[in-house]
Amino acid sequence: MSRRATRAVAAALAITLCVACGEDRPAVARSTYTLGFVNGASTEFHNCLQKAVEGEATRRGVKVITANSKQDPKAELSNIENLIDQHVDAVIVQTVSTDALEADIAKARAAKIPIFLTSVAPADTGSILGAVAVDLNQVGLLDASWVSNDAVGAPGTAAVIAGAPGAASDLLIRGFTDNLPKNITVVASKPGMFDRAKAKAVAAEMIKDHPDLGYAFVANEDMAVGAAEAFRAAGKSVKIVTVNGTDTGLAGIRDGRFAATVSNPAARLGQQAVENTISLLNSEPIDQIDYVAISLITKIDLARAPSYCLID
């Protein structure tokens, strides 16, 4: 998808980003900053994202102070308040819920500390420094397109195992379900809370209720491992499509547990977040919105799959 087309999709989802207000940006460019990074959880995605943020900050001689909200919006706001008290120059946020962002941004703006977001951004285009976004609608669409091509018009059923309600997971699931062909019916949808054991239990319940289930969309590959175990234990062959392109995911593609995944490298997301935050603080002429490149990966595409996480 072209950059122009990607921007159009993002705008339709009301997650377009914006130029930061001038009062939140320094008048003189600087080479060193202290950045805050508020992570949303401790899944493989979040851990790789933080590793990339810290690595890029070190490479650029920038100090970074990290905090983890553990999927709790109240903790997220508290983390931002703590970073404000430490007088950071900007805060990078991987939010736990887009509903929490309004209070987060208001608190930071009142302290004249700009916020840079990863993965998603609010519709209020005048309230943030910028963001590196993932076109989550496109991620879901790519998996839906694989299902469509595999079904070739025949009637079929699909189940959805979401992550945690709110933020990225909801947008991702909507991208999948909204782009399924009419011949595929979603018969079950339930969160797996980004937990393998929880997803396995959810999948076991789904296959019991829908023994003829044909497809399952699982919101990350760790949960997809649990879902595959449940389907296999029930003696059912359900085609799983998932997200991220981790080593675990690629192994699942290779051995046939998963039919497809969408590569969405957390390493590049974290690197771009630090890179763009510094550039925007220095008032450099770059886009206020950047997108991480994504791609559908099946068994024939394994050789071109990018690295998901930074290598030690």
Image (spheres, rainbow, N blue to C red):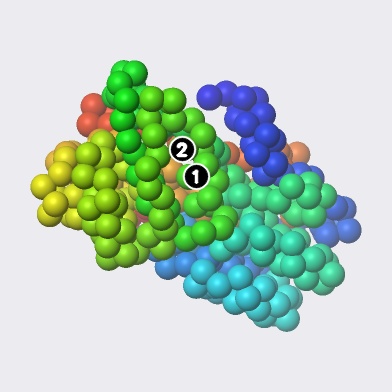
Q: Residue at x 37, y 43 (%)?
A: 187
Q: Residue at x 50, y 52 (%)?
A: 169
Q: Nearer the viewer, residue 33 or 178?
A: 178
**What kind of residue is marked 2?**
Phe
**x and y percent of residue 253 in the render?**
22, 39
72 up-or-down from 55: above or below: below
Identify the image quadrant of residue 101: bottom right
Identify the image quadrant of residue 85: bottom right
SS at circle 1: helix
Q: Residue at x 21, y 44 (%)?
A: 211
**x and y percent of residue 123 in the render?**
74, 47
Q: Residue furthest top?
A: 152
Q: Which mark is residue 172?
A: 1
93 up-or-down from 150: above or below: below
**What kind of residue is marked 1?**
Leu
- Say if mark 2 contacts mark 1, CB within 8 Å: yes
Q: Which mark is residue 219?
A: none
Query: Quick one: label 2, few (<14), some, or many (20+) residues within 10 Å?
Result: many
C-alpha span from label 2 to label 1: 7 Å
Identify the image quadrant of residue 3: top right
Query: Quick one: label 1, few (<14), some, or many (20+) residues within 10 Å?
Result: many
Q: Residue furthest front?
A: 209
86 up-or-down from 251: above or below: below
Q: Nearer the viewer, residue 223 or 294?
A: 223
Q: Residue at x 78, y 70 (%)?
A: 107
Q: Nearer the viewer, residue 80 or 275?
A: 80
**x and y percent of residue 296 in the render?**
37, 32
**x and y percent of residue 267 in the render?**
44, 51
Using residue 295 as the reference point, say whether residue 70 is left or right of it: right
Residue highlighted by disc 2: 176
Residue 241 visible in this rendered orientation of the protein: no
